[in-house]
Image (spheres, rainbow, N blue to C red):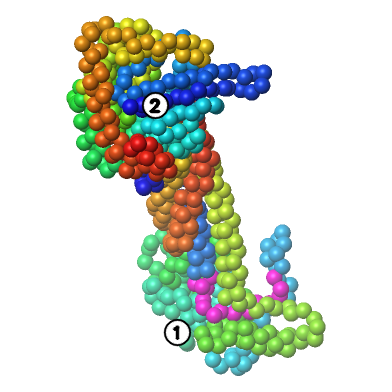
C-alpha cells in the first residue's frame, strides 16, 4: 500500500520534470550502453580472430625450419630448409593425413603496364584442400601439371585486381620474375588474415615449377599437415617432431631447429588474449556506470534541496518520513531502470551497427545485457538512498519555510 | 465538546543559557465547530503554538489532548498520520505544488490516504466546485491568481473532511478584494458546514469574524475574548447552533477516517468517549 502510494507519486514527479529526469537517467544510459557495446565489440573481434585462424585450415600443423626469432629485422630463420626428401618421409610416415609442401618466395608479377610485388607459393593441389580454399573461376592444378612442373598458376583476388584490372585473364600469360606463366584459375577471396595480412595477395604454382624455374633448388620452406578430426593433433605433432629430430640429426638434449605449430593451440591463445581485452574494456565501461550512479546521486541531492518546499508540503499533508524516502528511492530506481532500458536498446543497437561497420561478426551476449540492466536498477537505488534519506529526515516546519 | 485541549504547554528552544521559552505554560481549549482567531506580534509564540496544535512540532512540557487523547508524546510518523487523518492546513504562501494542476494538488492528501484514482478525482472535483474553481481544475498554480491559488489550498485542506483546519494568515499574501473573497469562503464554510477553524491573523477586522480571539504575548495567552460578531448579534447566537450540532459532520468524518487509523488506535477510543 505504502509502496503503491510512493510509486504513484514518484511516477507523477518523474513526468512532471522531464528534463531533470532525462539528465538523471542519462549517466546510466551511457554507462549501460558503453558496457554492452564494449563487450559485444570485444566478443565480435575475438570471434573474428578465431574464425580467421580456423580459416587457415582445421586441425592444421605447420612445420617450418628454425625457431622463429622476432627482432628488428622481422622474423628470421637460421636453420636450413626442408627438401623433397623430408616431404617423402612425411608421406611415408603418415598415410592418413593430407599434407602439402610449400615454397614461399617474394616475386614481382608483370602484365602489360602493370607491375605488382606479391608472394608466390609453390605447392601441390592438396594445399587448397587443407586451407579449405575454393577456386572461383577456372580450375585447380591437374595432377600432370604438378608432376611435370608446368608453367601454370592460380591467382589470388588482390593480384587479379591489381594486375589485370578486370580484364579477361584465363589462359592469358604473364611474367613472374623471369618466368612466363599461364593463368588457369582465380581463388575465391579470403580477406585479411588474423594477423592483418592480405591472404588474397598471392600467386599459386606447382611446387616443381617454383623449385626448378624460380628458386633453382629443391628446398621446401614449409610443410602443412592436416589431420582428420578423430586423430589427436598432439600425437601427430609429437611423431612429426620425433621424425624430424632424427632426420636432422639433432643430438639428445639439443634444441629443435624446426617448429611444429598447432593452429588450434594458437587459436586458443589468441582467443584467450582477446577475451582478456574484452574483460578489460568491459571493466572500463563499468566505471562509467558507476559514474552514472554518482550522477544520479548528484542530481537527486540537488533535487532534494530544490524540492525542500515540496517535501515540506507533503509532510504537512501527512506523508510519513518513510513515504518520502520511498518516493525518492523509487524515483531514483525508476529513472535508473528506465535509463538501463534505454541503455540496453542503444547498446545492442550500437553493437549491431558498429560490428557491421567494422565487419565483425555480431555475437549476442545475453548475460552482459541482463547483468548491466540489473546493475543499473541497483545503482539507482544505492545512489538514490542518501538523497532519499536526507529528504525523509527534513523537519516539516523548516521545509515549509524554505524558499 | 472539546476537540483540542492544551494543558500547561511549554515549548523551550535551546539549552542552558541560550534557552528561549517560546511558549510558557499555555492552557487553551477549542471546541468542535468553533472559529478561533489567533493574534499576536511576531515572536509572541503564536506560530509555535500553531505548530504544536498542527502536530508539526511537539511541546517540551505539558499535554496536548486531541479528542481527549494525549498526542504530545506521539513520534514523527504517528504525528504524520494524525495530520493525514484529522488536520487540514492553509498557509499564507499557499504552498501548492508547482507545475501541478489544481486538481492534482487537491488530490494529493487523498493519495496519502490511499484512495483510488476515481475516488480521488471525484472528491477533489467536488471540493474544487465548492470553492468555485470548477472551471480551473487543470490550471497550474502559475496560471492562477493569488486568490484562486488560496482557494485551491482551501479545497486541498477540506478534501479529507478534517476535524479541524489551521489557517496561518490565509490572506497575508492577498490584496483586499481577494482577502475578502477568502474570508467569505472560510466563514461560510464555518457557518454552513460547522467546520472548526483556527486562524492566525494580524488584522483585527479579520479576527472580528471569529467566535473567539486569542491573543499571544511573550509566550503566554494574554486575552481570550468572546466578542460578539460585529456583523450582527444574530450571527453569534446562530453560531452556537451549528457548533453544537457540528459534532455531526465532524464525527462522521472522523469515524470514516478512524477506520484506517493504525498506530494511534487509542485515538479512536478517545473519539468515541
Query: What chain does mark 1 sit on?
Result: A
Placement of the C terminus of chain B among the 4 image quadrants: top left
Instruction: Give neighbour class at mark 1: few <14, some 14-19, many 20+ (Cα, 10 Å).
Output: few
**A225 left or right, relative to A2:** right
Instruction: Please report the residue visible at 37 percent of the width from the left and 32 percent of the height from the top.
Output: B67
Q: Nearer the viewer, residue B168 or A262?
A: B168
Residue named by callout 2:
B4
Q: CA distance from mark 1 to mark 2?
A: 112 Å
Instruction: Please report the residue visible at 42 percent of the width from the left and 25 percent of the height from the top.
Output: B5
* Residue A147 at x, y percent in the picture: 52, 87
Residue range highlighted in magenta: A53-68
Q: Answer above or below: position of A176 versus B171.
A: below
**B239 left or right, relative to A191:** left
Q: Nearer the viewer, residue A179 or A331?
A: A331
Placement of the N terminus of chain B among the 4 image quadrants: top left
Residue named by callout 1:
A142
Amino acid at each position: 500500500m505504502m509502496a503503491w502510494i510512493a510509486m504513484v507519486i514518484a511516477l507523477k514527479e518523474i513526468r512532471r520534470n522531464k528534463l531533470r529526469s532525462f539528465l538523471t537517467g542519462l549517466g546510466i544510459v551511457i554507462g549501460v550502453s558503453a558496457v554492452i557495446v564494449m563487450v559485444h565489440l570485444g566478443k565480435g573481434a575475438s570471434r573474428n580472430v578465431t574464425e580467421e585462424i580456423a580459416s587457415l585450415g582445421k586441425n592444421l600443423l605447420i612445420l617450418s625450419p628454425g625457431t622463429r626469432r622476432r627482432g628488428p629485422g622481422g622474423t628470421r630463420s637460421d636453420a636450413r630448409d626442408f627438401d623433397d626428401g623430408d616431404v617423402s618421409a612425411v608421406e611415408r610416415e603418415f598415410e592418413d593425413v593430407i599434407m602439402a609442401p610449400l615454397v614461399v618466395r617474394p616475386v614481382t608479377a608483370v602484365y602489360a603496364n602493370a607491375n605488382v610485388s606479391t608472394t608466390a607459393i609453390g605447392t601441390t593441389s592438396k594445399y587448397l584442400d587443407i586451407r579449405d580454399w575454393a577456386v572461383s573461376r577456372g580450375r585447380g592444378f591437374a595432377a600432370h601439371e604438378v608432376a611435370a612442373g608446368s608453367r601454370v598458376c592460380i591467382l589470388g583476388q588482390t593480384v587479379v585486381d591489381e594486375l589485370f584490372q578486370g580484364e579477361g585473364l584465363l589462359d592469358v600469360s604473364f611474367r613472374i620474375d623471369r618466368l612466363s606463366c599461364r593463368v588457369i584459375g582465380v581463388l575465391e577471396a579470403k580477406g585479411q588474415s588474423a594477423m592483418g595480412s592480405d591472404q588474397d595477395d598471392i600467386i599459386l604454382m606447382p611446387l616443381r615449377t617454383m623449385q626448378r624455374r624460380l628458386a633453382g633448388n629443391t628446398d621446401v620452406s614449409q610443410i602443412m599437415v592436416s589431420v582428420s578430426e578423430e586423430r589427436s593433433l598432439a600425437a601427430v605433432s609429437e611423431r612429426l617432431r620425433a621424425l624430424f629430430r632424427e632426420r636432422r640429426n639433432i643430438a639428445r638434449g639439443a634444441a629443435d631447429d624446426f617448429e611444429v605449430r598447432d593452429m588450434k593451440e594458437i587459436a586458443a591463445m589468441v582467443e584467450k588474449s582477446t577475451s582478456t581485452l574484452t574483460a578489460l574494456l568491459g571493466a572500463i565501461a563499468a566505471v562509467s556506470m558507476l559514474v552514472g550512479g554518482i550522477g544520479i546521486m548528484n542530481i537527486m541531492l540537488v533535487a532534494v534541496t530544490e524540492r525542500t518546499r515540496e517535501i515540506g508540503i507533503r509532510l504537512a499533508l501527512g506523508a510519513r518520513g518513510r513515504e518520502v524516502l520511498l518516493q525518492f528511492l523509487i524515483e531514483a530506481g525508476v529513472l535508473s531502470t528506465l535509463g538501463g532500458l534505454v541503455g540496453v536498446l542503444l547498446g545492442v543497437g550500437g553493437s549491431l551497427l558498429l560490428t557491421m561497420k567494422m565487419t565483425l561478426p555480431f555475437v549476442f551476449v545475453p548475460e552482459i545485457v541482463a547483468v548491466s540492466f540489473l546493475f543499473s536498477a541497483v545503482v539507482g537505488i544505492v545512489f538514490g538512498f542518501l538523497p532519499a534519506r536526507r529528504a525523509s529526515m527534513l523537519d516539516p516546519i523548516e521545509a515549509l519555510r524554505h524558499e | 465538546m472539546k476537540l483540542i485541549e492544551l494543558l500547561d504547554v511549554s515549548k523551550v528552544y535551546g539549552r542552558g543559557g541560550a534557552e528561549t521559552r517560546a511558549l510558557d505554560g499555555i492552557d487553551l481549549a477549542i471546541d468542535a465547530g468553533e472559529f478561533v482567531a489567533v493574534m499576536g506580534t511576531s515572536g509572541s509564540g503564536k506560530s509555535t503554538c500553531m505548530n504544536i496544535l498542527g502536530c508539526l512540532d511537539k511541546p517540551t512540557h505539558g499535554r496536548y489532548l486531541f479528542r481527549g487523547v494525549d498526542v504530545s508524546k506521539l513520534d514523527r510518523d504517528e504525528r504524520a498520520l494524525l495530520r493525514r487523518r484529522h488536520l487540514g492546513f492553509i498557509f499564507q504562501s499557499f504552498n501548492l505544488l508547482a507545475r501541478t494542476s489544481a486538481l492534482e494538488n487537491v488530490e494529493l492528501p487523498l493519495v496519502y490516504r490511499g484512495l483510488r484514482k476515481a475516488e480521488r478525482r471525484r472528491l477533489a472535483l467536488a471540493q474544487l466546485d465548492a470553492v468555485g474553481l470548477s472551471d480551473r481544475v487543470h490550471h497550474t498554480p502559475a496560471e492562477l491568481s493569488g486568490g484562486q491559488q488560496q482557494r485551491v489550498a482551501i479545497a486541498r485542506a477540506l478534501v479529507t473532511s478534517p476535524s479541524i483546519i489551521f489557517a496561518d494568515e490565509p490572506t497575508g499574501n492577498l490584496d483586499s478584494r481577494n482577502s475578502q473573497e477568502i474570508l467569505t469562503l472560510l466563514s461560510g464554510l464555518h457557518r454552513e458546514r460547522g467546520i472548526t477553524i483556527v486562524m492566525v491573523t494580524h488584522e483585527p477586522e479579520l479576527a472580528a469574524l471569529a467566535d473567539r480571539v486569542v491573543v499571544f504575548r511573550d509566550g503566554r495567552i494574554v486575552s481570550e475574548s468572546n466578542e460578539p460578531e460585529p456583523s450582527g448579534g444574530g450571527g453569534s447566537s446562530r453560531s452556537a447552533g451549528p457548533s453544537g450540532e457540528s459534532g455531526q459532520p465532524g464525527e462522521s468524518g472522523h469515524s470514516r477516517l478512524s477506520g484506517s487509523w493504525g498506530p494511534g488506535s487509542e485515538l479512536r477510543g478517545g473519539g468515541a468517549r
